[in-house]
Amino acid sequence: MTAPERQTPDRWTVVSTAPFPAEALRRFLPEGTDAEIVVVEPRTEDGAVAAVAEADIVIGDFTFEVPITRRVIEAMTRCRAILQPSAGFQQIDHVAAAEHGIPVCNCAGANDVPVAEHTVMAGVALMRELAWTDRQIRAGQWPQFGRQNNEVASRTWGIVGFGRIGRQVAQRLAGWEMTVLYHDAFRPSAEDEAALGVEYAELDDLLARADIVSLHVPLLPATRHLIDARRLALLKPDACLVNVARGGVVDEAALLEALRDHRLRGAALDVFEQEPLPAGHPFTELDNVILSPHTAGTVVEAQVRILKKTKANLDRVLTGEPLVDVVNDVG
């Protein structure tokens, strides 16, 4: 879809649903830009509706707390772009934005490397019982022979979702003497598979064969609870699951039951269906789970890349240049 022509304003209005200080946002703008900076308060859908009517540019919320819903988008009268300072953009109704000719841009690729690094770290930590032994030592124990401490060499790693991050994981596993399986709706060429050292498998087959399974798919209607009770039952009893995708990709109730019953070795979870994870959540009571607060990609280097990408697209809006990383096909 092509965005409608909009007259260049004499004074720009930039509205942020993210908790950026107004002065920090002003430093994003080229020197001499005449602009009003508005930071949404209260940080709610109602607050966003009230703030965006005269917005020329809207900056999305990297905490995902303030939704840019259809209702918010319909309140926009002259918005030229919604810029999301993260790779994820699930709080933005990008379909509604497309219907109104508003491009939505994310920061694709900015955190691919740290998420892949976190994935490999978490999978190896689960196989080596690192979190459990740490807790044992803190409790005054000295468990030199852990419950089930295994090397990863000669094991099988299954990558579910073979986009940018899935491929980065495969690249980092090269040389580990592992069999690397992958499943994705779109298969790369045989030459790419050979170069990456991976083998395609149907999802159920991958789950049944893998010792470590990592998830890298977006949350879509087709992927919600992709890993459900039936598919969890396909995993080996000593297999590990790493979820750095979205919490809703896994049926958390079924996973909790499988972990409690030790029907799989453990799980490393960076994402959850409800974030922040509520205090006292049953996952926090298990000793075969590694938890992190959706921080797999939030390293300093990735944050710098995100700020640079967001500023670059902001500059493009101001100068009328074509945007990059547009997720909803609006030209």
Image (cartoon, rainbow, N blue to C red):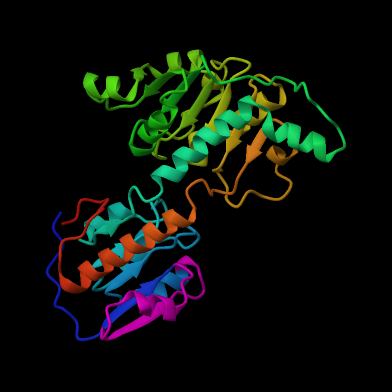
Q: Is residue 200 above or below residue 34?
A: above
**Closer to the camera, 290 or 301?**
301
Whether residue 41 is in magenta: the answer is: yes
Residue 252 pos. (x, y %): 59, 34
Q: Quadrant of residue 57?
A: bottom left
Q: Considering the image in quadrants, where does the N terminus appear? A: bottom left
Determine the residue positioned at 69% across, 30% down. Answer: 288
Work out which residue is located at the far right of the displayed protein and give it.
Answer: 140
Q: Is residue 168 visible?
A: yes
The magenta region covers 18-45
Whether residue 84 is in magenta: the answer is: no
Determine the residue positioned at 37% across, 23% down. Answer: 183
Q: Quadrant of residue 224?
A: top left
**Closer to the camera, 313 or 304?**
304
Q: Is residue 251 visible?
A: no
Residue 45 pos. (x, y %): 46, 66
Work out which residue is located at the far front of the displayed protein and give it.
Answer: 175
Residue 151 pos. (x, y %): 60, 20
Q: Is residue 323 above or below residue 212?
A: below
Q: Is residue 78 left or right of residue 308?
A: left
Determine the residue positioned at 24% across, 85% down. Answer: 11
**Closer to the camera, 285 or 303?**
303
Q: Is residue 162 left or right of residue 32?
A: right
Determine the residue positioned at 53% across, 18% down. Answer: 153
